[in-house]
Amino acid sequence: MQSDSTNPQTLKLTFLGTGTSQGVPLIGCHCRVCSSDDPRDKRLRSAALLTSGQEHIVIDAGPDFRQQMLANRVDTLRAILLTHEHADHIFGLDDIRSYNWIQKRPTDIYAEPRVHEAIKRIYHYVFLRWKYPGIPQMELHELSNQPFRIDGLEFIPIRCYHHKLPVLGFRTGQLTYLTDANAIPEEELEKIKGTGVLVINALRREKHISHFSLGEALDIIRIIQPAKAYLTHISHAMGLYHELERELPENVFLAYDGLQVEIGL
């Protein structure tokens, strides 16, 4: 994607992955979703790519990060934003080594202090005084609940809760991206209002302890009233893409891996 010619007045969102922590299909599962031949029913772990001009920013780097970067030909990487520290969101960080080599600099990683501690524990070899040759190079940037900028883009963190775990969503311009959440405080909903494109997790139809169900996600969409909304972090329990897509309101879409959306800034 190094030669991408995206209009600098627009933001391109690419869904790198739209599945749950186990992805779809699940190992050993032969349900009709996991056995589907429709590529829209095959989901890597949830992550997103934001492209503005020539710059690429990734939200979350799970175990499929390498595969996602290769599939989407992302040859350079400006930064990574992390929503939280669960394995399906940070276990691909070792593969930033290629970007370190290509760009001759550490990769900027933006996350809350608690997430930094998890990174330092899991990738302890990155932070040793004596560094093994070829290890990943990370520049950690602490996030709070205050807006921050990466070059020309302003990001507004959105505090959500993944059961009892505080996680972050992100708003930039007309886009808000929320994943792994089942509760959003009222004051944080106010930050989202006016969003043109809302991405929100919807795990399955039934209620879940730490993720929005389909009905709960649709309730949030009705409150925010975006022009378009996309559902992500989808499990095999949600059902087949082509069946569910027909049930959704006209402004709500089931995201799938590789889907690209142009959003005005």
Image: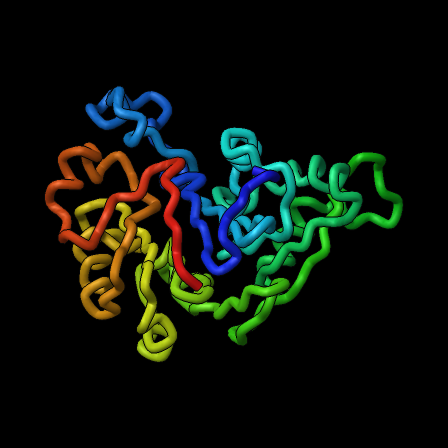
- 135 vs 168, left or right, is right
| On-image quarter of the C terminus | bottom left
| Residue that extends furthest to the left in the rendered view of this protein | 247
Quadrant position of residue 238: top left
Q: Nearer the viewer, residue 39 or 12?
A: 12
Q: Looking at the picture, how far across and down is residue 261, in whole percent?
A: 37, 48
| On-image quarter of the N terminus | top right
- 192 vs 114, left or right, is left
Looking at the image, residue 231 lies above or below residue 192? above
Label total for image: 0
Residue found at x 53% / y 45%: 5
Tell me, yes or no, if residue 141 can be seen here.
yes
Q: Nearer the viewer, residue 208 or 75?
A: 75
Looking at the image, residue 186 lies above or below residue 183? below
Looking at the image, residue 112 lies above or below residue 96? below
Q: Looking at the picture, how far across and down is residue 262, in whole percent?
A: 39, 51
Quadrant position of residue 70: top right
Tell me, yes or no, if residue 86 can be seen here.
no
Q: Nearer the viewer, residue 195 or 237?
A: 195
Instruction: Name the colouring of the figure.
Output: rainbow
Residue found at x 69% / y 40%: 99
Looking at the image, residue 10 lies above or below residue 259? below
| Residue that extends furthest to the right in the rendered view of this protein | 130
Q: Looking at the picture, how far across and down is residue 129, in whole percent?
A: 87, 50
Residue found at x 44% / y 66%: 173
Residue found at x 23% / y 62%: 221
